[in-house]
C-alpha cells in the first residue's frame, strides 16, 4: 500500500532574523537522508506569514536548488495579496518546484463562491501544479469538500490538497467525493496522527510537522504500509499519538518544534520570527521527554 510523507519544513533564521541558509541546507539534508517523500517550504510551520516577498524568493531558490531531484519540493506561496500569490507561484514553478501549496486569503471570512473565484483565477494564471490548503483554525473558514470537487473537475492543474483539520470526517468526505472523479487528485492530511487513517481511507498520506524532528520514524511508517505490516503500522500510530503532545507544550507550536530540534542537535538555533515565544528550560525538558517516550 503506497503512502507518502511530506515534511513542512521549518524556516531557520540567523540571530539578525535573516534566512540561515547554512542551517537550512543541514535541515534539508536531514530530511532527505531520513527518507521523507518530499519537502514543503514556506508553509505555516515555515512562518510564511512573517517573511517578506524577496526573502521568500531567496528561500525558494535555495530550497529548489538543494532538494530538486532528491525529493519532491513543494512551495507555500501564500499571501494576503492575490497578485503576490500569483507572482510567488510563478517564481517557484519557474525555479523548478514540483508544485505550490496555497491557503486562501484570511482575516475576513469568505464565502465558498469567493473561494472558487480565488482559486479559479489562480489556476488560470499559473502553469503548474496547485495544491489547495485548507486550515480553518487559521483562516476562520473551511474549503468545503464540494468546492474541492468543483475545482478538481474544472481545473486540471489543481492536483491535490492539504487538509489540516482535526479528525478525519472532512478529509474522508474529500476522498469520497473527489477520488472517483479525479483518481490522481492527492489528498494529504495536515496532522501527523491522521496519517494512517488517511491511507486506510484511500488518501495519499500526510504533510506533518513532527517529521522535521524524526524523519526516519515516518519513513519506517511508510515502509510498514508498503509491506502490509499492520502490527508496525499500529505501533507507529500509538507512538505518534503520544508525540502529538508536543503541539500542546506552548502556543503557537512553531517555536517549540524548533526548540526540540535544537535540543537534539538537528539545527543550531531555534530562533523564530518576532513575536513568537521562546521555549523555557522547563518546556525544553518536557519536549525532550515526549520524544524519548515516543
Image (spheres, rainbow, N blue to C red):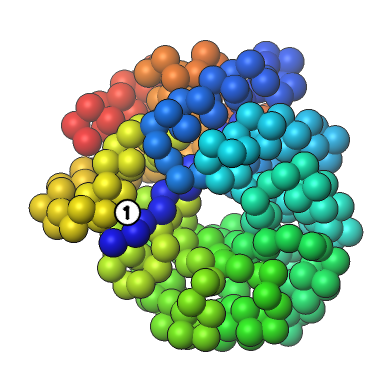
Q: Nearer the viewer, residue 11 or 156?
A: 156
- The local crowd at label 1, few if under 14, some if 14 to 19, many if 20 or more residues have their Cα within 10 Å, is many
User: Residue 16: x percent and y percent?
Assistant: 73, 15
Q: What residue is at 78 percent from the left and 53 percent from the top?
A: 89
Snapshot quadrant of residue 15:
top right
Q: Which residue is outermost to the front?
A: 69
Which residue sits furthest left?
231
Q: Nearer the viewer, residue 170 or 125?
A: 125
Does 239 sit above or below residue 185?
above
Quarter holding the N terminus is bottom left
What x and y, as percent, mark residue 126?
81, 63
Residue 239 vertical placement versus 233 (above, below): above
Q: Residue at x 46, y 56 (%)?
A: 190
**Is residue 239 found left or right of 100 in the rendered image?**
left
Residue 117 point in image, percent of width and height: 79, 78
Q: How many marks?
A: 1
Label 1's element?
A: helix
The answer to whether residue 233 of the structure is visible from this angle is no
**Image coords of residue 294 (percent x, y):** 22, 36
Q: Can residue 169 be seen from the camera position used here?
A: yes
Tell me which residue sits at (54%, 36%) in the image.
Answer: 70
| Residue in view at x 22 percent, y 50 percent | 224
Find residue 213 and report its image quarter: top left
The image quadrant that residue 130 belongs to is bottom right
Question: Which residue has dot 1 on it?
Answer: 193
Amino acid at each position: 500500500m503506497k503512502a507518502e510523507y511530506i515534511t513542512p519544513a521549518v524556516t531557520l533564521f540567523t540571530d539578525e532574523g535573516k534566512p540561515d541558509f547554512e542551517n537550512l541546507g543541514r535541515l534539508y539534508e536531514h530530511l532527505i537522508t531520513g527518507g521523507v517523500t518530499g519537502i514543503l517550504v514556506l508553509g505555516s510551520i515555515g512562518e510564511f506569514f512573517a517573511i517578506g516577498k524577496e526573502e521568500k524568493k531567496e528561500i525558494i531558490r535555495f530550497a529548489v536548488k538543494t532538494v530538486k531531484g532528491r525529493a519532491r519540493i513543494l512551495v507555500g506561496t501564500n499571501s494576503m495579496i492575490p497578485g503576490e500569490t500569483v507572482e510567488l507561484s510563478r517564481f517557484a514553478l519557474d525555479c523548478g518546484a514540483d508544485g505550490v501549496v496555497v491557503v486562501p486569503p484570511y482575516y475576513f471570512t469568505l464565502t465558498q463562491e469567493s473561494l472558487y473565484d480565488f482559486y479559479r483565477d489562480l489556476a488560470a494564471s499559473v502553469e503548474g501544479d496547485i495544491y489547495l490548503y485548507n486550515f480553518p483554525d487559521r483562516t476562520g473558514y473551511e474549503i468545503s469538500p464540494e468546492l474541492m470537487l468543483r475545482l478538481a473537475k474544472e481545473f486540471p492543474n489543481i492536483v491535490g490538497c492539504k487538509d489540516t483539520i482535526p479528525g478525519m470526517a472532512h478529509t474522508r468526505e474529500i476522498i469520497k467525493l473527489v477520488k472517483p472523479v479525479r483518481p490522481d487528485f492527492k489528498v494529504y492530511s495536515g496532522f501527523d496522527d491522521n496519517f494512517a487513517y488517511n491511507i486506510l481511507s484511500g488518501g495519499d498520506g500526510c504533510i506533518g510537522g513532527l517529521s522535521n524532528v524524526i524523519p526516519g520514524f515516518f519513513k519506517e511508517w511508510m515502509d510498514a504500509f508498503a509491506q502490509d505490516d499492520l502490527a508496525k503500522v499500529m505501533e507507529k500510530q500509538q507512538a505518534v499519538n503520544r508525540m502529538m503532545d508536543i503541539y500542546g507544550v506552548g502556543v503557537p507550536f512553531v517555536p517549540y518544534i524548533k526548540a526540540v530540534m535544537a535540543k537534539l542537535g538537528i539545527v543550531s538555533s531555534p530562533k523564530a520570527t518576532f513575536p513568537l515565544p521562546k521555549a523555557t528550560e522547563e518546556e525544553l525538558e518536557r519536549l525532550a521527554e515526549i520524544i524519548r517516550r515516543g
